[in-house]
Amino acid sequence: MRRTRILTAVLALAAGLLSGAPTALAADPPAPKLAADTYTWKNARIDGGGFVPGIVFNRSEKNLAYARTDIGGAYRWQESSKTWTPLLDSVGWEDWGHTGVVSIASDSVDPNRVYAAVGTYTNSWDPKNGAVMRSADRGASWQKANLPFKLGGNMPGRGMGERLAVDPNRNSVLYLGAPSGKGLWRSTDSGAGWSQVANFPNVGNYAQDPSDTSGYASDNQGIVWVTFDESTGTAGSATKTIYVGVADKDNAVYRSTDAGATWQRLTGQPPGHLAHKGVLDAKNGYLYLAYSDKGGPYDGGKGRLWRYATGTGTWTDISPVAEADTFFGFSGLTVDRRKPGTVMATAYSAWWPDTQIFRSTDSGATWSKAWDYTSYPNRENRYTMDVSSSPWLTWGANPQPPEQAPKLGWMTEALEIDPFDSDRMMYGTGATVYGTENLTNWDSGGKFAIRPMVQGLEETAVNDLVSPPSGAPLLSALGDIGGFRHTDLTKVPSMMFSQPNFTTTTSLDFAESNPNTVVRTGNLDSGPHIAFSTDNGANWFAGTDPSGVSGGGTVASAADGTRFVWSPEGAGVHHATGFGTAWHASAGIPAGAIVESDRVDAKTFYGFKSGKFYVSTDGGATFKESPASGLPGGDSVRFKALPGGKGDVWLAGGAADGSYGLWHSTDGGTSFTKLSNVEQADTVGFGKAAPGASYQTLYTSAKIGGVRGVFRSTDKGASWTRINDDAHQWGWTGAAITGDPRVYGRVYVSTNGRGVLYGDSSGGGTTDPGPGPDPTPTGACEVTYKITSQWSGGFQADVRLTNTGTRPWTGWSLAWTFTDGQKLTQAWNAEAAQSGSTVTAKNVAWNASVAAWSSVSFGFTASRSDANAKPGAFKLGEQTCAVA
């Protein structure tokens, strides 16, 4: 598994792709025709796929738990379905960095409240500062407090924590540990406002690699955890004793005994290590600390476990093994709230042969291990593992002892025992969340059962997507775990692409007229960087690299699969006939060009580099520069040729400080026309044509009509429909998009950390509102009202309004009455207000137009009493709507 997970093309993004105003045009373009269609969005199931550095259980409500990811947002556990619900899908394009969650905190006084400290990078890669998100409805909706510094959800040290904590006695008080020398911060108004704790004495000094000029590994990891001693406060008054962990090997732990007024370094503390975690057993008066000589999550060669007696100030080394015998650091750390004295820890950086989990039932006096050697290299496990729900977790490996497949884990920095159930434990790895529900079997000599507890949590970074006209509907190129062939989008594939297993797949293509022929390229520490399949991606064999290849780059298959063009990293563009046994340098095209193929003419290939378009008509042997001008000057471009249309090419990309948008060529790239109704575009893809349409459906991640979103056009780009909404934005979606050639309206969208999303139209909407719309909707309508989440004192609901008439709307206003005293608190994708018991929801700008037999959806949260009856009637103006 690759040990760095950095945003694809992040340097290009930071250079201006996400900032600034849209490109200025010579003349104002005509206003784009925008309609609304309601889509249902789901993940193509992979289950996991990335690092889960934090798991947090609420201490006062059973079954309430949260998980944070380094680039893919935060999740809430749903006990009824044993699944995770994503909470930060509403993060938009310009705030893409806020999908990286450096810490999460659940309020034990008011379990409805949850907080997330967000921000992906502290260096220049992320152009925006971090923020603290706060929710009063368990993450169903959020408010944001922007911070005057950056946070690093995907930076070194991200497995330490939790950096964000709520005072368990006075829950309006929160603390946040900041990186980059910014110190300790405090809020006294439930996360709305923040100020630095000016008298906190140490901002930290540890950086993974001070010589790193990018600022990634050289950043000061700062304040890394905050822990309250709840026994030193009473309800409504601030907790007096607070412990804070600092990234300083000689001064790692500080304490306040006067509710943060003053701070002192804990005397007698052990030097030479970083305290990754500080977990308090208040009943027994012990602060447990997990130490490593490095910040993690990948590194760490030595570690210790210490116990601090809060009453006497006594330090005790309770490490399970001698320091000389460690080759790892400790990080995962938890105590059993039901059985004081039970403590567990992980050897997070034990990459080989496996991670280790340690357990003590006597406050660290003695320990047992999750596995141990019988006679080397043979080992005996205290556990069983069942990964049948995520079979790819074996990586298809057949290792020699003492390694096993699947592994117990790696990068195991998150470890939590359920505070209400001593038998349930969850822990995060670099690829999944594992858990058990019979943990105490460990103590009785039996075996406890480990299985993935990750369904619903999707954390892959997507580089490329293809949907062939036959065979599997979806093939994906992913970071860290290679990619998958989905024959069923609702099921986890049995294995990632293998033979070879790329750590990251960078590019995919198939032969348009022979979809059984598939090619992929990717990164591998040692071995080939290209692979081929002759059975639609079910099985693979490695190709041969030309000299100098260091990375996957982009690859294109001829329309009939007889030849390939490859633009790898470290070498120039090459071409080959057959399956890449003999590559030849291509002439006339610069190294690093993006390459694609014509989907009709098997000898025609295209390339793009630094504002220039290149065309080959001899199978990639030679390229000629196109005379086309006005294309984007940088390399943040994606382009594709239309299936079935020779010489029909669409190109998306650019940057805010130059040409930016969507271009179309019908003459094989000799000339391009820029679409005047698309302000910015970053991807382009094709899907099955709409009923009655002669041209395939276009899809793009773009800015159209001043709105950022995912759009569809069924009339060659003349008009557009936004098919996502403000609740479904997923941060950055600029790597890839493709429609499904077999299902009209279905689209596959890439994300950087939320996996592969696919959308299906609920209403079958059209893109053009047509002539003569009703200024005020009076035709037939239908409403679907669905309560999607409910908790003590509140609930969330989705409303779908369908135009069942014959004429389109250009505005709408829907009203209903609550009968059980429900009170609206927040709404999205509609302007909503309540007067007495009557709620009125009106369109916002982008979803005002609703075509005949199309739908528009919006959502809201509201307070409630014990009863929560659904409204029995809805009115659109004076028209009563049918209730589905």
Image (cartoon, grey):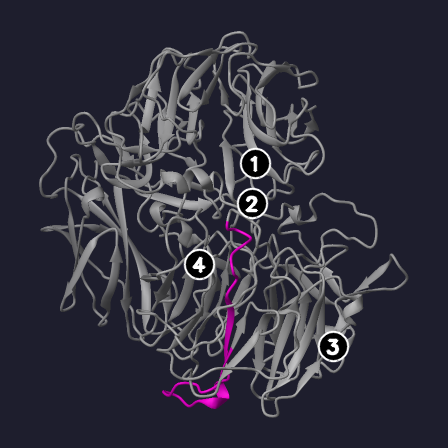
Seen from the viewer's position, the closer of residues 569 and 781 is 569
Cα–Cα gap, marks 2 and 4: 35 Å
Residue with the most extreme bottom position: 312
Quadrant housing residue 428: bottom right
Residue where numbered disc 2 is placed: 491
Tell me which segment is drawn in magenta.
215-243
User: What is the C-alpha distance between the residues marked 1 and 2?
Assistant: 8 Å
873 displayed left or right of 423: left
- The amino acid at mark 2 is Lys
What residue is rendered at 35% in x and 28% in y? 698
Q: Is residue 149 magenta?
A: no
How far from the left and from the top, in percent, is residue 780? 17, 43
Residue 657 vertical position relative to residue 814 in the rendered view, above or below: above
**Residue 873 seen by the camera:** yes
> Which badge, 2 or 4, comes first in the chain's sequence?
4
For the stretch drawn in magenta, the main secondary structure is loop
**Residue at 64% over, 58% down:** 411
Measure the alpha-carbon separation of dots 3 and 1: 43 Å
Please give the label number shown on residue 151: 4
Kindly give the residue lying farthest to the top in the view shown: 618
Q: Which residue is mark 1?
A: 487
Q: Earlier in the sequence, mark 3 or mark 4?
A: 4
Instruction: Provide the residue designation for mark 3.
Output: 443
Circle 2: element type = loop
Q: Going from the N terminus, do you reach mark 3 or mark 1 first?
A: 3
**Foreground tag (2 vs 3):** 3
Q: Rounded to the nearest whole Å, what is the CA distance between mark 3 and mark 4?
A: 40 Å
Disc 1 residue type (three-letter): Thr
Please name the amino acid that badge 4 sits on: Leu
